C-alpha cells in the first residue's frame, strides 16, 4: 500500500490482464502502518493517468471508510466485505448505501456453511430452489453485489439463476434473524 508499490501493482495487474485500464481497483485490507492518504494519492494518480476508473476498498469498517472518504480525491465506489446470512453486517450495509457505496458480499455462502442452516434449508424446500440460491437471492434483495465462488459448472449455472423470482418479505426477514456466527475471515492483521 506504499505509494510506489500501489503504482507498480497496478501496472503488474494491467500487464497480467492484458488491458490498459481497470474498471475498479480495490485496496484489499486497511493497514494502519501505512497512512491512508499515501495509498489514496497513488490511486488518484492512476485515475488521472486513465489506468483506473473507479476506486474500491475491501474489509473496511465504517470508521475506515470515513477516513478514506475524508482524504480521497475520488468517490469510494465499492466496499467488498464478508457478508452472508450468518454474518449480516446490517449497519455497514446501511452506511454504505447511504453514501452510494456498493457493497460486495464476499463468502456469500459462508464458504458453504450457511447452506446447511435450518432456515435456509426450509426456505429452499418452500421455493423449490437450492440453499445457495436462497442465500444469493437474499443478498441481491438486500442490494448487495454477490461473488460466490464455485469450481462446479452446475453450481455456477444455478447460482446465476436467481433473477426471475423473489423471496417474500416475511421470508427475507426470517433470514435477517438467523443467529449470527463469528467472522470466517479474520486474519491476525485484520483491524476488526
Ligand atoms: N476481499 C477479501 O478479503 C476476500 C476474502 C475471502 C474471499 N473473497 C472472495 O470471495 C469470493 C467467494 O468467497 P469464498 O470462495 O471464500 O466463499 P463462498 O463463495 O461463500 O463459498 C465457496 C464454496 O461454496 C461452494 N458452492 C458454491 N456454489 C454452490 C452451490 N450452488 N451449492 C453448493 N455449494 C456451492 C463451493 O464449492 P464448489 O466449488 O464445489 O461449488 C465452495 O466450496 C471469492 O472470489 C474470494 O476471492 C474475498
Image: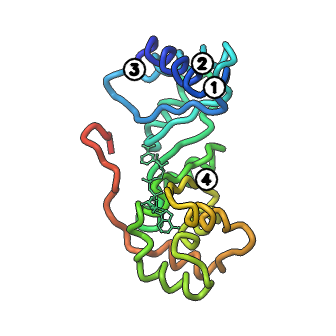
- Number of the label disc, if any, that sits on residue 35: 3
Give the vertical position of 119 relative to 109 (above or below): below
Q: Which one is in front, 45 or 15? A: 15
Marked residue nearer the N-terminal end (3 or 4) = 3
Residue 187 x %, y %: 28, 43
Report the residue marked by disc 2. Answer: 44
User: What is the distance, in whole Å, between disc 2 and disc 1 at their CAs?
Assistant: 7 Å
Q: Quadrant of the C terminus?
A: top left
Report the residue marked by disc 1. Answer: 74
Label 1 environment density (alpha carbons within 10 Å; few <14, some 14–19, many ≥20): some
Label 4 environment density (alpha carbons within 10 Å; few <14, some 14–19, many ≥20): some
Residue shown at the point (56%, 49%) measured from the top left: 104
Q: Which mark's residue is nearer the viewer, 3 or 2?
A: 2
User: What is the distance, in whole Å, between disc 3 and disc 4 at their CAs?
Assistant: 29 Å
Residue 84 x %, y %: 47, 62
In the rendered view, does 68 fall on the left or right side of 48? left
Is mark 2 in CB contact (under 8 Å) with mark 1?
Answer: yes
User: What is the distance, in whole Å, between disc 1 and disc 3 at their CAs?
Assistant: 17 Å
Q: Residue 14's image quarter?
A: top right
Q: Which mark's residue is nearer the viewer, 4 or 2?
A: 4
Q: Residue 139's image quarter?
A: bottom right
**Residue at the right extreme of this rendering:** 164
Give the vertical position of 164 relative to 187 (above or below): below
Q: Secondary structure at mark 3?
A: loop
Marked residue nearer the N-terminal end (1 or 4) = 1
Residue shown at the point (44%, 23%) measured from the top left: 36
Marked residue nearer the N-terminal end (4 or 2) = 2
Residue shown at the point (58%, 68%) measured from the top left: 138
Q: Quadrant of the N terminus?
A: top left
Q: Is mark 3 within 8 Å of ligand 1?
A: no
- Count the marks: 4
Label 3 environment density (alpha carbons within 10 Å; few <14, some 14–19, many ≥20): few
Amino acid at each position: 500500500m506504499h505509494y510506489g508499490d500501489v503504482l507498480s501493482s497496478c501496472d503488474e495487474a494491467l500487464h497480467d490482464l492484458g488491458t490498459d485500464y481497470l474498471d475498479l481497483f480495490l485496496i484489499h485490507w486497511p493497514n494502519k502502518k501505512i497512512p491512508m492518504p499515501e495509498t489514496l494519492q497513488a490511486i488518484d494518480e492512476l485515475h488521472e493517468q486513465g489506468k483506473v476508473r473507479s476506486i474500491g476498498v475491501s474489509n473496511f469498517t465504517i470508521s475506515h471508510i470515513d477516513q478514506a472518504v475524508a482524504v480521497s480525491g475520488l468517490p469510494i465506489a465499492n466496499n467488498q466485505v464478508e457478508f452472508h446470512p450468518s454474518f449480516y453486517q446490517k449497519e455497514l450495509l446501511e452506511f454504505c448505501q447511504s453514501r452510494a457505496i456498493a457493497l460486495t458480499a464476499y463468502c456469500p455462502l459462508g464458504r458453504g456453511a450457511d447452506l446447511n442452516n435450518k432456515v435456509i434449508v426450509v426456505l429452499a424446500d418452500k421455493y423449490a430452489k437450492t440453499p445457495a440460491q436462497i442465500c444469493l437471492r437474499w443478498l441481491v434483495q438486500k442490494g448487495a453485489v454477490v461473488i460466490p465462488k464455485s469450481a462446479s459448472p452446475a453450481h455456477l449455472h444455478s447460482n446465476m439463476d436467481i433473477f426471475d423470482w423473489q423471496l417474500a418479505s416475511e421470508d427475507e426477514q426470517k433470514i435477517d434473524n438467523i443467529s449470527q456466527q463469528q467472522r470466517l475471515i479474520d486474519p491476525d492483521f485484520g483491524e476488526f
